[in-house]
Amino acid sequence: MNDSAYPDALPAQHRLHWYVLEKVLGQGGFGITYLARDTNLDQMVAIKEYLPGDVATRRPDGMVRARTESQRERYRWGLDRFIREARTLARFDHPHIVRVLSVFELNETAYMVMRFEAGHNLGAELERRGVLPEEELLRILLPVLDGLELVHGAGFIHRDIKPDNIHIRDDGSPVLLDFGSARQALGKARTLTILVAPGYAPFEQYYSSSEDQGPWTDIYGLGATCYRAIAGTAPLDSIARSKGVLGSTRDMLVPAKVIGKGRYSDRLLAAIDHALEFAEKDRPQTVAEWRSELTGESAAPRPAVAPHQPGEGSGENGNF
């Protein structure tokens, strides 16, 4: 864990309370995720450390600090959001959303402890196989939709849905990971950190405030993920698409109905193309609406798994 790929990571065998870090699982725009052992319960967990690389860095004493005095307020605001969002998202009890076990503050930052899920991510699966058959794609997609619907019902959106954030457990079931980009879509707005995955992020994530982002933003990411699974490549980035759409010429994205014709059902291809509409108002507005397009069933929302109500205190348990 001391290699140059993760210069800001804590070293192997470092202790955070009763957790012993084993290795880095990954690093993203908001932080570093470690594999760790819970020495109390003798089980492996994943721990995400809030460390936004654009505004913060690790000091020699292990503390995390803003890079400059002018970035301190932004760092503290993000830290507060990280903690509050972890506690809120921890209420959700759903088999296809990664489970949060606790959140705590240390080293002038915060740590989110999650259940470690053995398996691999969908991105790796697609790199290996290229494309997926329709039946297998739907076995992954539909359970994720059920979990995401619960998150949307609480006023949250994920904002970073892509193949790398869909984990496939050893038993084949999917779980949606990395809500590090999650932001409340309802209520008082504040400028959102722009964190996008080219090809999987709709145009509104590049330029707009939170009022323009909602369930339709995540539906675009899911549509793009499906496009990758049928085409073997991610769709054209929305910034590149904008040059045609906003220039009053034509959208340069080759539709799924063209790429997948004869290999996938017309229903699936039409649903993917609808999810990838350039303008947010032209996409399905809810998970229930898009699910009905995928399955042909009614658009009534599925019965939600009741949120778990955590107790008071900084160590609230639940799932995420």
Image: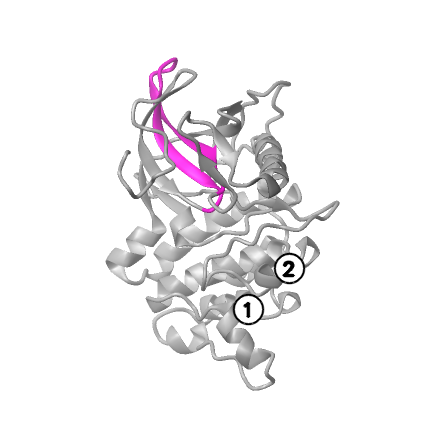
Helix, strand or loop at disc 1? helix
Helix, strand or loop at disc 2? loop
Residue 303 seen in the current view:
no
Q: Is residue 125 above or below residue 284?
A: above
Judging from the image, the colouring scheme is: one colour
Q: Residues within 10 Å of mark 1 (few under 14, many from 20)?
A: many
Q: Amino acid at mark 1?
A: His
Q: Position of residue 123 (x, y in %)?
A: 34, 53
The residue under label 1 is 274
In the image, taking residue 255 as reference, residue 82 lies left or right, namely right
Residue 145 is inside the magenta segment? no
| Along the line of sight, the residue nearer the viewer: 260 or 167 | 167
Give the numbered dot on residue 17. none
- Residue at 65% across, 60% down: 208
Give the numbered dot on residue 285. 2
- Residue at 41% across, 38% down: 32
Main SS, magenta region, reads strand
Magenta range is 29-52
Q: Position of residue 301 (x, y in %)?
A: 62, 49
Q: Residues within 10 Å of mark 2 (few under 14, many from 20)?
A: some
Among the two numbered marks 1 and 2 on one chain, the one whose residue lies closer to the N terminus: 1
| Along the line of sight, the residue nearer the viewer: 203 or 70 | 70
Q: Is residue 317 above or below residue 172?
A: above
| Along the line of sight, the residue nearer the viewer: 21 or 64 | 64
Q: State the separation of the CA atoms marked 1 and 2.
A: 11 Å
The outermost residue toward the front is 69
Residue 47 is inside the magenta segment? yes
Position of the N terminus, as image quadrant, is top left
